[in-house]
Amino acid sequence: MSLRRKFEVALPMELFRAFSVLRARVNGCVAPALFGPEEVHGYELSDHAMEDLAEREIATAWVVRVLAAPEHTQLDRSDPDLVHALGRIAERDGRLLRVVYNAAVQPPRIVTVYFDRRERG
């Protein structure tokens, strides 16, 4: 369940980010490595993608790495504007990170980011 859905009212994105960083610090994570920078050069992050990064503890540096040199790319099955960039993350035991972005807009917009459970090393 999304952190935002746990609250009765939707949090403004700035408060959501601050809460995510605080939660990471309380849980013993290193917040700056996980949630900063909030920008991926040449791409725009959707609110959903930012939530994904926080909730799934995915470093933006990993997203940058996958987008810069994907091991594989795929077109989305249902939306021809979406591209899936895939790359293994050594820091996560070689798990496959899937970054889905809309290539039809400028700058390309990252829609979602997750570790693909179907694809194992």
Image: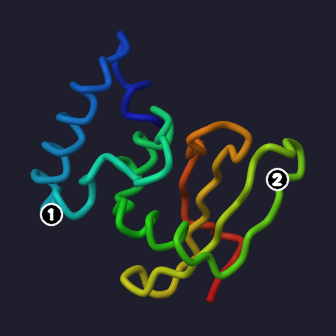
Q: Could you say whether the residue bearing mark 1 is in a helix, strand or loop?
A: loop
Q: Position of residue 17 (x, y in %)?
A: 25, 36
Question: Residue at coordinates 44% horizontally, 65% vertically from top-left?
Answer: 64
Query: In the shown orientation, is residue 7 left or right of residue 78?
Result: left
Residue flagged by tag 1: what amino acid is it? Answer: Val
- Classify 91 as above or below 99: below
Residue flagged by tag 2: what amino acid is it? Answer: Asp
- Classify 111 as above or below 73: above
- The label shown at residue 30 is 1
- Classify 19 as above or below 58: above
Would you name the residue on which mark 2 appears?
76
Question: Residue at coordinates 64% horizontally, 71% vertically from top-left?
Answer: 86
Q: Position of residue 91 (x, y in %)?
A: 36, 83
- Classify 34 as above or below 18: below
Distance from disc 1 to disc 2, alpha carbons, whole Å, reads 33 Å
Numbered disc in front, either 1 or 2? 2
